[in-house]
Structures are given as structure tokens and as C-alpha cells.
Amino acid sequence: MSEPTPALLALSDVEYEYTGALVLRGVTLDVEPGEIVALIGRNGAGKSTLLRCAAGWSAPSKGTVHVTGEELRYADRELRSQLVLVTDTPPFYDDLSAREHIKFVLRANRLQEREAEAERLLTDFGIADAADAYPSTFSRGMRYKLALVMALALQPKLLLLDEPFGPIDPVSASELWTALRAASARGSGVLLSSHQLPEGAMPDRYVVLEDGRVLASGSAQELAEKGMSATLSSVLHSMLSADTASCDA
């Protein structure tokens, strides 16, 4: 029998401690090829920290992070190049225009042939006319769109997004969801945190995080079978209410 294909991302019993306080508490989750997973939870639940650990930007205090079956802390540059994290406030260079940022990132990854794809994404997100301006002159939403263009043009195996729909307008949010579905169709995995999703968007799976631990996970159908609505706000409210009730019992 052939060996099963490892998950693109696998966190096992991950804990993260900051100034003596546990931010993540025994988190275990995975993202399979072609899967979009929505990480939901209240402010301070640990979503951003989880994404940073998943990207290798922060080292867990305990537990392991594997990418395509290889432990991330031992991964080489080639493997790390297959995952991209877009934070909620992406940084940019002061002396490079938006288009120069894109060319720099693509050339650094030897992917110059994707410049045309990047130009298409600039148009789709409505910032093509500002591509020769400096990101320091952009609004927050425009800066986030630029970071998304660079990330999507790289076509990584694993895409990690921190609150991608919050800063951008509804039209661009719909374009982003279309782009994420196209990425998943190519076999890429997506893990995103969000308090809101575009109308009609449905992740393959939800993971509910509260106080640094996973309360529940499952597809919309699996959550519906538990008597919970598949909408983002309803899933979050239902799970947090159930958790509060269990604590009071």
C-alpha cells in the first residue's frame, strides 16, 4: 500500500506562552490540499498567534508544526518558500513602488513569469492605476490588497491569511474569495482567520478558537448536523454559548 499523502499543514498539541501567559493551549488542527479552513474566534482568542506559529514566524513553546509532513523548525528554505503568511498589517519598503514590490518578490522567488498574473490581480483588486505609487500613500485596504497580490502571484502550497476580508471593500472581497477557490482547485491549502466572509462564501471547514484552544471544528454540514447554523456569526455564537454553558454546569 502507498503511504497516505501528509496534510499540507498539521499542528499537534501546540502551546505558545507569552510573558508567562498561555496564548495557545494544546491546539491541534490540519489543512489538507485543496481545502479552505476558516479560523474563527473572538478578539484575543489566539488566531493571529496560531497563524504566526503555522508560518514559522513564532516558535511554539510546546508541540509541533509540520508542513507537507516535515517539521517546520527543521525545514529548509525551499519548503518555507511554499508557505506564505499575510498578516493583518503587512509591511512594505519605503523606497519601492507597489509594482516594484511585486517584481522584487517574484524575482526573489525566481518566478518572473508570473508578472502578467500579478498585473491581472492588480486589476481585479482595483489598484492597477496606483501600481507605480508608493504603498506609504495607500489606504489600509489598498496596502492589504497589494500584499494579497504578491501572495497570490506566488501560488504557494499553503496560504495563511490574517483577517483578509476586514480591510477590503465588498467587491474586492468577492474577487479574493474567487481567487482563493482557484488556488484550492490547484491543490493549495488556505487557512484564514476572519470575523466576516463575502456573501455566499462557504469554507470547507471551520475551526472555532476560544482562549487559545479549539472548541470545535467541522464542515458546514457537520456543524449543521449538530444543530448549528453554518453562518460565521452563528457558528461562533453557538460554540461560545455552548462552551459557557458547559463551564457553568
Image: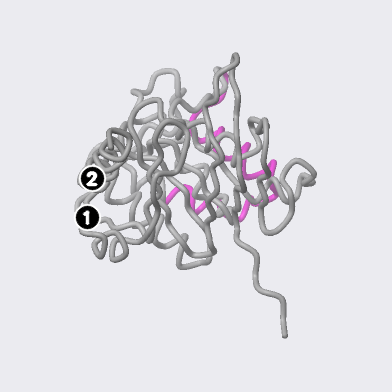
Residue 94 seen from this side = yes
- Prevailing secondary structure class for the magenta stretch in the rendered image: helix
Would residue 128 appear left or right of 65 to someone viewing this image? Answer: left
From what the image shows, is residue 159 above or below residue 246?
below
Q: Residue drawn 72% across and 81% down?
A: 2
- Quarter of the image holding residue 137? top left
Q: Residue drawn 47% across and 48% down?
A: 191
From what the image shows, is residue 112 above or below residue 89?
below
Residue in front for this viewpoint, 177 or 237: 237
- Quarter of the image holding residue 230? bottom left
**Element type at mark 1:** loop
Q: Amino acid at mark 1?
A: Met
Q: How many marks?
A: 2
Q: Residue drawn 74% across and 49% down?
A: 71
Residue 128 seen from this side = no
Residue in front for this viewpoint, 200 or 124: 200
**Quadrant holding the C terminus:** top left
Residue 182 x %, y %: 42, 62
From what the image shows, is residue 199 above or below residue 49?
below
In the rendered structure, are the residues bearing label 1 and label 2 in contact, judged by CB atoms less than 8 Å apart?
Answer: yes
Q: Amino acid at mark 2?
A: Ser
Q: Is residue 185 magenta?
A: no
| Residue with the mark numbered 2 | 238
Residue in front for this viewpoint, 209 or 231: 209
Residue 153 x %, y %: 52, 50
| Highlighted magenta segment, given as a residue range | 95-120
Color encoding of the figure: one colour
From what the image shows, is residue 17 above or below residue 247?
above
Mark identifier at residue 228: 1
